[in-house]
Amino acid sequence: MIAPLPGPAPLRRRVSAALVLQPSLWPELVEAPRLTPSDYLRLRRVAARLSIAEAADRLVDSRADHRRAVAFLRRLETPGRTALYRSTIAHLLRAFPFDPDVYWQLAEEPPHRHPRICRGCGCSAHDRCGDGEGGACRWVEQDRCSACSRGGRTCA
Ligand SMILES: [Zn+2]
Ligand SMILES: [Zn+2]
């Protein structure tokens, strides 16, 4: 008999397939990378057809503050960055439409509690695109709205 080599014991405990396949047990396995708060702001700005400089124009009253506003927007759109204060995000509503609640849910809630968001334009339940006929977009896929699926988008 040869003595077993020291080392980590092999994992013998098997988890049943039925348990592994429970969706509630794999919240990290959502399709596509998770949308971050910075992604969300960028999607909504682009959907409003604004460059960072144009969005910055709407945030400040004087030309002198423009550069600071550009830096502020760039920071908020940097992957991994999240605003510290509610007031910061509320102020951004001067620049383009989005839903601050969605921003904070992405920032603070676990993935399985994130709201449904269009990957094309960032629209969500309380922040829909127009359909060009006075109505709102609808979901055509889990993460795509009817405005985006047509190719030409009517969001903004
Ligand atoms: Zn969309
Ligand atoms: Zn939409």
Image (spheres, rainbow, N blue to C red):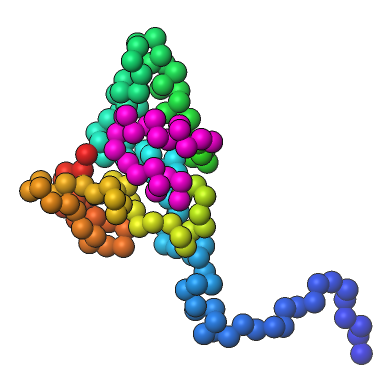
Is 149 on the left-hand or right-hand side of 34?
left
Quarter of the image where one finds residue 77: top left
Q: Residue at x 42, y 62 (%)?
A: 31
x, y percent for residue 2:
91, 85
Measured as percent of width and height from the top left, residue 102 is found at 39, 48
From the viewer's perspective, is residue 93 above or below residue 11? above
Q: Evaluate whether residue 151 shows in this view.
A: no
Magenta residues span: 84-105
- Does residue 110 appear to the left or right of 46 in the view shown? right
Residue 36 belongs to magenta span: no
* Residue 119 visible in this rendered orientation of the protein: yes
Quadrant of the drawing holding the N terminus: bottom right
- What number of labels is visible? 0
Identified at 31% across, 62% down, the residue is 142
Q: Residue 20: name its quadrant.
A: bottom right
Q: Nearer the viewer, residue 138 or 52?
A: 138
- Residue 114, compared with residue 82, is above or below; it is below
Residue 34, x across and y down, in percent = 45, 54
Q: Residue at x 32, y 58 (%)?
A: 143
Whether residue 93 appears in magenta in the rendering, the answer is: yes
Q: Residue furthest left?
A: 133
Residue drawn at (37%, 31%) of the image: 92
Where is residue 156 drawn, in percent x and y? 22, 39
Depth check, front residue: 22 or 108: 108
23 left or right of 99? right
Single out the residue that lies furthest toward the top: 64
